[in-house]
C-alpha cells in the first residue's frame, strides 16, 4: 500500500516589541522578542494549478490560479498577506507549486503582536517549499509583500523578529544594516503583555501619516537619508525652522533610538530599574510627541505603574489600541495580572487579556 504523503507543517511566531517604536521605518533600532503564539500552516497537495487558502480564524475557502498571481492586485481580504508573498516569490524567479495552505494562528489579530507578519512568514515558508532563500531574504520578501501588495508602508521589524527570533533573548535590530545583537532578559523580570481589547480605526491611516511626517522632518536635513542620522543637537538647531508636528515626530524618533541603545546596555548590566524607566519614557514620548497612543493604552500604563513589582510599562506595536508590554518581578506577576484586569474592567467595562511571554524561537518547519 502506498504511504500517505507527509503533511508539511510550518510555524512562524508573532512578536512583542520591548522598546524602539516607529523607529524601524526611520532606519533606526528596535528590540522585539518572538513569542510563543504564532501562525501554523499545514500544506496539502491539490491537483488544480491553484493556491487554495483556508483559515481557521477567517471563514471562506479561497482559490487563485497560479497563472493569475503575478498580475494580481490586492483583493482587500486577508488573503492579500499570502498573495503578496506569492507574488514576491514569483518575482524572485521561483516557481509556485499547487497547494492548499490550511492556516491556524494563535496570534490575536490587530492586537499589535503582529499576526500579519506571522501569516506572511509562515505563508512564505510554505509557498517556498524546497526553494531556499536566506533568512534575511525571507524577512525582506515578506516586508515587500506587506508594503507593495497590502499597501502598508511598514518597516522590517515584524517580519525580521518572526524569522530571527531566539529563545530566551531579545533581538536588538539595526534596521539600516539589517543585522542584530542578542540581548538578555534579566532573570529578575517577566515580560507580561496586556491586551487593551480595543483597536481604533484610525490606526492604519495614522501610520501612513507618521511615515509622511517623518519624511517631512527629514527634508530639513539635506544629505541625510533617514532620521536615524540626525542628532539631537542638529534637531535643536533646526527647530526654529520646523513646524511643530514634524519637530515632535523627529524628537520621538531620535530619542527613541537612544533609548533602545541604553535599554540594551541596561539589559546587559541587569539593571531592571533603568530598563523600566526607559520603557516609561518611550511610552510618554509615543503619547505626547508621536501621538499614537490612546486613552485605553495610557490607562493601562498608568495603572501598571501603581502596582508593586512593575519596573516599567509602555504601549507596544503601532498604537491606537492593541497591547502594552510590562516588565514585572516574577513574584508579583499573579497579583499584577489580577489587579490590572480588575482595574481596567472597572474603568472601561472590558476584560483585558494578559499573556506571559518568554522569548521564543523564530520561524521554522515543524514536521
Ligand atoms: P497585527 O499584525 O498587529 O495583528 P494587522 O492589521 O497588521 O495587525 O494584521 C491583521 C490582519 O492580518 C488581519 O486583519 C487579517 O487580514 C490578517 N491575518 C492575521 N492572522 C490571520 C489568520 N489567522 N488568518 C487569516 N488572516 C489573518
Ligand atoms: Mg501587522
Image (cartoon, rainbow, N blue to C red):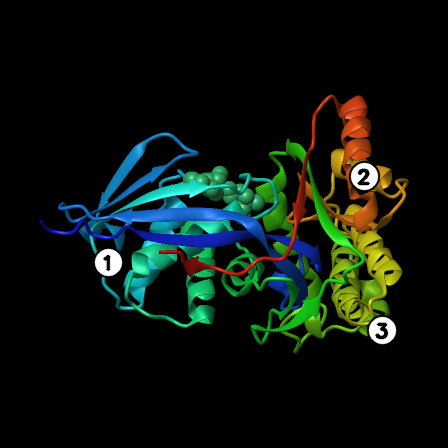
Mark linked to residue 233: 3
Q: Is residue 164 above or below residue 154?
A: below
SS at badge 1:
loop
> Which x, y percent locates residue 198?
65, 32
- Quadrant containing the C terminus is bottom left
Q: Quadrant of residue 250?
A: bottom right
Q: Earlier in the sequence, mark 2 or mark 1?
A: 1
List the residue tagged with mark 1. 96
List the residue tagged with mark 2. 336
Q: Earlier in the sequence, mark 1 or mark 3?
A: 1
> Which x, y percent locates residue 74?
37, 45
> Which x, y percent locates residue 27?
62, 68
Q: Is residue 284 above or below residue 337?
A: below
Verify CB contact (< 8 Å) between mark 2 and mark 3: no
Q: Residue furthest left?
A: 1
Q: Is residue 250 above or below residue 36?
A: below
> Which x, y percent locates residue 5?
20, 52
SS at badge 3:
helix
Q: Is mark 1 within 8 Å of ligand 1?
A: no
Residue at the image position 61 percent from the left and 45 percent from the top: 112
Amino acid at each position: 500500500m502506498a504511504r500517505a504523503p507527509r503533511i508539511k507543517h510550518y510555524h512562524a511566531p508573532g512578536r512583542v516589541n520591548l522598546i524602539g517604536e516607529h523607529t524601524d521605518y526611520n532606519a533606526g533600532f528596535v528590540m522585539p522578542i518572538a513569542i510563543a503564539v504564532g501562525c501554523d500552516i499545514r500544506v496539502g497537495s491539490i491537483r488544480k494549478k491553484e493556491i487554495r487558502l483556508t483559515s481557521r480564524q477567517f471563514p471562506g475557502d479561497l482559490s487563485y490560479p497560479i497563472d493569475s498571481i503575478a498580475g494580481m492586485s490586492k483583493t482587500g481580504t486577508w488573503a492579500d498577506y499570502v498573495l503578496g508573498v506569492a507574488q514576491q516569490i514569483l518575482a524572485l524567479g521561483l516557481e509556485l507549486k499547487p497547494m492548499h495552505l490550511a492556516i491556524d494562528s494563535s496570534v490575536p489579530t490587530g492586537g499589535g503582536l503582529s499576526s500579519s507578519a506571522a501569516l506572511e512568514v509562515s505563508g512564505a515558508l510554505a509557498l517556498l517549499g524546497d526553494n531556499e532563500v536566506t533568512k534575511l531574504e525571507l524577512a525582506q520578501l515578506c516586508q515587500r509583500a506587506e508594503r507593495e501588495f497590502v499597501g502598508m508602508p511598514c518597516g522590517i521589524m515584524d517580519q525580521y523578529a518572526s524569522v530571527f527570533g531566539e529563545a530566551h533573548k531579545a533581538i536588538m535590530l539595526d534596521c539600516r544594516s539589517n543585522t542584530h545583537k542578542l540581548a538578555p532578559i534579566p532573570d529578575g523580570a517577566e515580560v507580561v503583555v496586556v491586551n487593551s481589547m480595543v483597536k481604533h480605526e484610525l490606526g492604519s491611516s495614522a501610520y501612513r501619516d507618521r511615515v509622511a511626517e517623518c519624511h517631512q522632518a527629514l527634508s530639513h536635513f539635506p544629505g541625510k537619508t533617514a532620521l536615524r542620522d540626525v542628532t539631537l543637537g542638529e534637531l535643536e538647531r533646526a527647530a526654529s525652522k520646523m513646524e511643530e508636528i514634524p519637530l515632535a515626530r523627529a524628537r520621538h524618533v531620535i530619542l527613541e533610538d537612544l533609548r533602545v541603545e541604553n535599554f540594551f546596555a541596561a539589559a546587559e548590566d541587569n539593571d531592571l530599574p533603568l530598563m523600566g524607566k526607559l520603557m516609561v519614557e518611550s511610552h510618554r514620548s509615543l503619547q505626547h510627541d508621536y501621538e499614537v497612543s490612546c486613552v485605553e493604552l495610557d490607562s493601562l500604563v498608568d495603572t501598571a505603574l501603581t502596582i508593586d513589582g512593575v519596573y516599567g510599562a509602555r504601549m507596544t506595536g503601532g498604537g491606537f489600541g492593541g497591547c502594552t508590554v510590562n516588565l514585572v518581578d516574577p513574584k508579583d506577576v499573579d497579583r499584577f495580572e489580577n489587579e490590572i484586569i480588575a482595574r481596567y474592567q472597572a474603568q472601561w467595562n472590558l476584560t483585558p487579556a494578559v499573556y506571559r511571554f518568554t522569548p521564543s524561537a523564530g520561524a521554522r518547519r515543524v514536521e
